[in-house]
Amino acid sequence: MTVHSAPIGDFGTNCYIITDETSGESAAVDCAVFDADYEALLRKAGVTSLKYILLTHGHFDHVSGVKALKDACGGQIVIHPEDAACLTDPKKSLNSYVKYAELAPVPADILVEEGSELFLGKQKITVMHTPGHTRGSVCYLTENKMFCGDTLFRLSMGRTDLPGGSTLTLFASLERIGRMEGEYDVFPGHGETTTLSYEKRNNRYLRTT
């Protein structure tokens, strides 16, 4: 599985394009805005069509470009049901409270829950429901890679002071992540890529020793 990424939009949202090298099938993870930078990311990844648009949660800085991306490249829009309304309601996505790209409403195609599975070719993507930043926040796990949105950051965690956020719920989600076995490269919604082992050792919200 190859990963191409770029920080997109005014909030530096990490947007990812993942591709199964065997089948050539690709998915996007989040789309802050569909602009020249995002189009450059698609060219860098060598992608003209998508199988999925995987959304880690429904905040405007992760979903505002989804409709334009779908119109350009196809792809089934995937989100947890708790955040699905963010795709059509600018108040729920918080888009109406900030000066940002206008949210073009678009419905979800696939609603995923804890343990849901999707495939790029034969490569499985497993959904882990990690509420706390929002009620519908999820991580997407494939191979040894974790795309965690705003649940977990390098040496930090997502904020919980926005509607639908809960510090105690996020702590519980991070505790689950901290108990995971094996090593993962961690691709967060903002900031630097990290690893699960590094966060277990150093992140005060995840440290297990």
Image: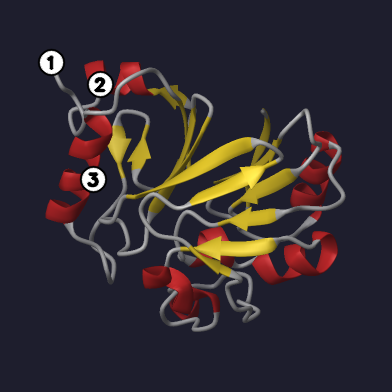
Q: Residue at x 31, y 48 (%)?
A: 158
Residue type, numbered disc 3: Ser
- Residue 167 image position (x, y, % from top left): 16, 54
For marks 2 and 1, give the CA distance. 7 Å
Q: Residue at x 73, y 60 (%)?
A: 75
Please indicate whether residue 52 sits to the left or right of residue 111 in the image: right
- Secondary element at tag 1: loop
- Among the 4 quarters of the image, the one containing residue 33: bottom right
**Depth check: 192 or 45 in front?**
45
For marks 2 and 3, give the CA distance. 14 Å
Residue type, numbered disc 1: Thr
Q: Residue at x 60, y 67 (%)?
A: 64
Q: Residue at x 53, y 27 (%)?
A: 143
In the picture, the quarter occupied by the C terminus is: top left
| 95 shown above or below 175 | below
Q: Which residue matches tag 2?
A: 200
Q: Which mark is residue 173?
A: 3
Residue type, numbered disc 2: Lys
N-term mark: 2 or 1: 2
For marks 3 and 1, give the CA distance. 18 Å
- Residue 118 image position (x, y, % from top left): 57, 49
In the picture, the quarter occupied by the N terminus is: top right
- Residue 55 image position (x, y, % from top left): 53, 57
Residue 189 visible (yes or no): no
- Among the 4 quarters of the image, the one containing residue 3: top right
Q: Which residue matches tag 1?
A: 209
- Residue 82 image position (x, y, % from top left): 36, 71
Q: Does the residue at mark 2 contact the one at mark 1 (Cβ under 8 Å)?
A: yes
N-term mark: 2 or 3: 3
- Secondary element at tag 2: helix
